[in-house]
Image (cartoon, grey):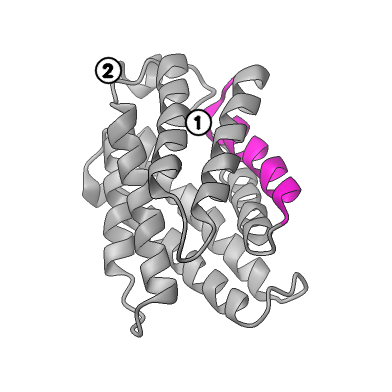
Amino acid sequence: MSSPSDRSPSGPWSFDPVALGGHECDAWVGYYRRDWRLVLRAAVGMVRVGFGLSWPATLRGAWYVLRANQAWAPYPDNDPDATRELMRRFYALVAAVHQLPIDPVEAARLEVDWWHEHRVLQRERTDDDESRLVASLTALYAYVYERPASAMTPAARDRALAMRVSDAWVADGCDVTDPRVAEERALLVASYTSLLAAVRH
C-alpha cells in the first residue's frame, strides 16, 4: 500500500473531523427518531467527507449505509445478514475507488461487530463497561486503515463515549433540544480528530 503522502488529499486519510463528527451526530439523531431522510442526508455527508468519493459514488455509498441502518434498526428482530451484505457493498465501493487492499467481507464483519457490541451494551447489559465496544471499533479502524490497534484506541474510546451519551439521550426521549446532543457531537469531533492524527502518522 502506498504511503499517506502518496495518496490523494481527499479520502480516508484526509478529512474534516468537525464536519464528519457533525454528520455522524445528525445520523444518530435521525436513526433514533426514525427520520430516515435525515439519516440519508447525514450519510451523504459522512461518505463524502470521510471517504472522498465522487458524487455518484457518494450517493451510492450513502444509500448502502442507509439501507444497512434500516436492516439493523428493528429490535430484536433485525437482519444482521442483510446489514453485513449492504456494508460489504459499501466497503467494496470504497476499496475500489481508493485501491485499498482490504477484504470488503471482513471490513463489513468488523463494522457490524461494533454495531452489535453497542446494541448489547445499550439494551442487554446492566453495566457501563465500554471495553468490548472500544475493542471492536479499534479492530475495525486498525484493519481498514492498516495502523496498530494502539494508535486507534483513543479515537475508538471517544466514539464509544459519544454512544453512551447518545444512549442516555435516547432513554430520556430523544429531545433534539437536549444539550447532550451537543456533547455527543463534541465527542465525535474529538474521536475523528484522533483518528485523523493516527491515520496520517
Q: Judge by depth and name the residue closer to the eye, 31 or 20.
A: 31
Residue 20 showing in the rendered view = yes
Examine the rendered structure and indicate whether residue 184 appears above or below residue 3.
Answer: below
Q: Residues within 10 Å of mark 2 (few under 14, many from 20)?
A: few
Q: Residue at x 56, y 70 (%)?
A: 166
Can you tell which mark lies on residue 60?
none
**Main secondary structure found in the magenta portion:** helix
Label 1 sits on residue: 14
Label 2 sits on residue: 1
Asked where in the image residue 180 lies, by quadrant, the reply is: bottom right
Across and down, in percent, residue 197 comes to 41, 42
Across and down, in percent, residue 76 comes to 45, 66
Q: Is residue 27 magenta?
A: no
The amino acid type of the residue labelled 1 equals Ser
Q: Earlier in the sequence, mark 2 or mark 1?
A: 2
Estimate the spatial distance between the alpha carbons at disc 2 and disc 1, rounded to whole Å: 16 Å
Q: Judge by depth and name the residue closer to the eye, 55 or 106.
A: 106
The amino acid type of the residue labelled 2 equals Met
Examine the rendered structure and indicate whether residue 85 appears above or below residue 171.
Answer: above
Q: Seen in the image, is 198 located left or right of residue 34?
A: left
Across and down, in percent, residue 107 comes to 33, 36
Q: Residue at x 55, y 79 (%)?
A: 168
Image quadrant where one finds the C terminus: top left
Q: Secondary structure at mark 2?
A: loop
**Mark 2 vs mark 1: in front:** 2
Q: Residue at x 72, y 76 (%)?
A: 178
The magenta span reads 35-54
Q: Residue at x 58, y 66 (%)?
A: 184
Q: Residues within 10 Å of mark 1 (few under 14, many from 20)?
A: some
